[in-house]
Amino acid sequence: MARDVLAVTKSITIALDAMGGDQAPHMVVAGANMARERFPGAEFLLFGDRAPIEPLLASFPALAKAARIEHTEEMVAPDAKPSVALRRGRKTSMRLAIDAVRDGRADAMVSAGNTGALMAMAKVVLRTLPGIDRPAIAGIFPTRRGETVMLDLGANIECGADNLVDFALMGAFLARAVLGVVRPTVGLLNVGEEELKGHEEIRQAGAILRGAELPFDFHGFVEGDDITAGTVDVVVTDGFTGNVALKTAEGAAQLYADYLRRAIQGSWRGRLGFMLARPAFRALREKVDPRRHNGAMFVGLNGIAVKSHGGTDSLGFSNAIGVAVDTVMQGFNERISAELSHLHRVGGAVPKAAAC
């Protein structure tokens, strides 16, 4: 996604879980400052321990004018079970940031904290949009053609056909709102392109999507290599498969980066070649840098919540904030609600699967 400076045309407030993430709160505050430079009109609510946050905020005078600290000493532990965090975490920085969205004090929230706890809290506090059974985690993948939306990336380990159909709808709306694709193409991730391939739920979802009148083009089944090829604008799968694919892609990128580093450092010819090709290597690094694609959105919730990678730095966190601001500016949830209402008014354009 582009990271140019954009004018915020309406007042936008982003709630930040200042204590979530491996490098919090420094990464959060510094990331908010970077995001403020891109979105000069945005304001921030920082939820967390005032003692470490306040001096960090003071080091960014322009951000300090656009931010307010809301103190709490409680935070969600990285290894906390979602159920425990939900019961005992009402005063944590994560929960208070979500509450700010529910109460209308913030337009969106961003956290680099515990993913399971964030999903559990956000689903209970914000609830799902009318017509959506389960929220999903959606992210943006770099591809040969540009960028592709992929969901679910880990919110739902098991999904029925109806859930996959909902994900296809929400992914298409996200591609239109954030990527600017007028009529997205959507594919279901499978072990082959043939209609008889895959488990029962994915075959059933494919049959529903092929036979429905939809505001996007259903491509059919796609395979793993189609993700990076950019074969479709939206890749739909269950959370188990999506999370494995995401972690595999991240690991593969790191592996090849390590191989390249060793090859360069292994001889004087390699080092000389690197010096000559430095501009090309720099462009490649920026293209595949995971920090520039950081920020996964929980789609289907009645409020905007964005999950940042826990191990990211300030640049990565600023881009997660950018995802939140972009979706607010594009009226993402309003578009989903309007599209779903339209589909229901025209007689249930998306049929539901028979009970499995």
Image (cartoon, rainbow, N blue to C red):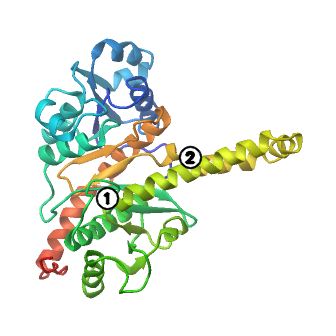
Q: Nearer the viewer, mark 1 or mark 2?
A: 1
Q: Residue at x 88, y 44 (%)?
A: 269
Question: At label 2, which amino acid type do we have?
Answer: Asp
Would you call the spot at circle 2 few (<14 residues within 10 Å), some (14-19), or many (20 or more)? some
- Looking at this view, is 242 or 287 the one in front? 242
- Looking at this view, is 66 or 118 the one in front? 118
Q: Which residue is mark 1?
A: 239
Q: Quadrant of the C terminus?
A: bottom left
| Residue 162 x/y as whole percent | 20, 72
Label number found at residue 144: none
| Residue 345 x/y as whole percent | 11, 77
Residue 207 in the image: above or below residue 284: below
Q: Secondary structure at mark 2?
A: loop
Q: For residue 183, say whether it is visible.
A: no
| Residue 246 x/y as whole percent | 44, 55
Would you call the spot at circle 1 few (<14 residues within 10 Å), some (14-19), or many (20 or more)? many
Question: At label 1, which amino acid type do we have?
Answer: Gly
Left or right: 267, with 300 as reference point:
right
Q: Which residue is mark 2?
A: 289
- Looking at this view, is 274 or 36 the one in front? 274
Q: Earlier in the sequence, mark 1 or mark 2?
A: 1
| Quadrant of res 112 | top left
Left or right: 58, with 97 as reference point:
right
Left or right: 158, with 40 as reference point:
left
Residue 319 in the image: above or below residue 93: below
Mark pair 1, 2: CA separation: 23 Å
Residue 74 in the image: above or below residue 106: above
Q: Secondary structure at mark 1?
A: helix
State if disc 2 and disc 1 touch (CB < 8 Å): no
Q: Residue at x 27, y 18 (%)?
A: 49
